[in-house]
Amino acid sequence: MTDDPKDTTNPNQTSKREVKVTELVANDGILKGKKTDVQNPELWQFPMNYPLSIIGHEGEHDSLLNEVKLILGSQFPEFDLASMEVKPSKTGRFHSVRANLYLTTVEQVNTLYASLDNAKTVRMVV
């Protein structure tokens, strides 16, 4: 018999490998509200210019752009949709839509991220 921890035939080793199950408790206070809500509103200073990159797959380029235009156009009527930039990634697998928004409240941020989270063609927002 050996003291190899992988040797399951050694009775001394198997008794040491007991697994204790502990009760899992929700980690309160880490995420407040919805996953798209701002978690630290005291760090945001409004009004502000807010650069945004919205990323989607290459094959969804046109639908990504249309969906982003609908979201930004409805939430920011004064935003110039022609100012958005669309760029492919280095590998060509993704496209990003870049916009610079003028935000005045934390509610605007929460609504924007919730809308982008629900968009079918949006994969990530940076």
Image (cartoon, helix red, strand yellow):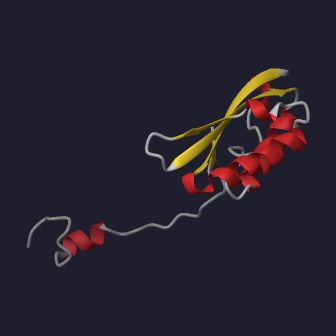
Give the camera-side residue of 31 and 54.
Answer: 54
The structure residue drawn at horizontal position 21% and vertical position 75%, both measured from the top left corner, is 8
Splitting the image into 4 quarters, where does residue 18 fall? Answer: bottom left
Q: 8 left or right of 108? A: left
Q: Position of residue 37 (x, y in %)?
A: 77, 43
The structure residue drawn at horizontal position 20% and vertical position 68%, both measured from the top left corner, is 6
Task: State whether residue 64 appears in this view.
Answer: yes
Q: Position of residue 9 (x, y in %)?
A: 17, 79
Give the camera-side residue of 12 and 88.
Answer: 88
Q: Position of residue 120 (x, y in %)?
A: 70, 59
Q: 40 left or right of 92? A: right
The structure residue drawn at horizontal position 16% and vertical position 75%, both measured from the top left corner, is 10
Determine whether 33 is above or below 80 in the image. Answer: below
The structure residue drawn at horizontal position 67% and vertical position 52%, both measured from the top left corner, is 62
Q: 65 left or right of 104? A: left
Give the camera-side residue of 32 and 123.
Answer: 123
Splitting the image into 4 quarters, where does residue 77 fall? Answer: top right
Q: Quadrant of the N terminus?
A: bottom left
Q: Position of residue 4 (x, y in %)?
A: 14, 65
Q: Quadrant of the C terminus?
A: top right
Task: State whether residue 33 appears in this view.
Answer: no
Determine whether 51 is above or below 14 in the image. Answer: above
Count of numbered tags:
0
Determine whether 66 is above or below 85 in the image. Answer: below
Instruction: Give the farthest residue toward the left.
Output: 1
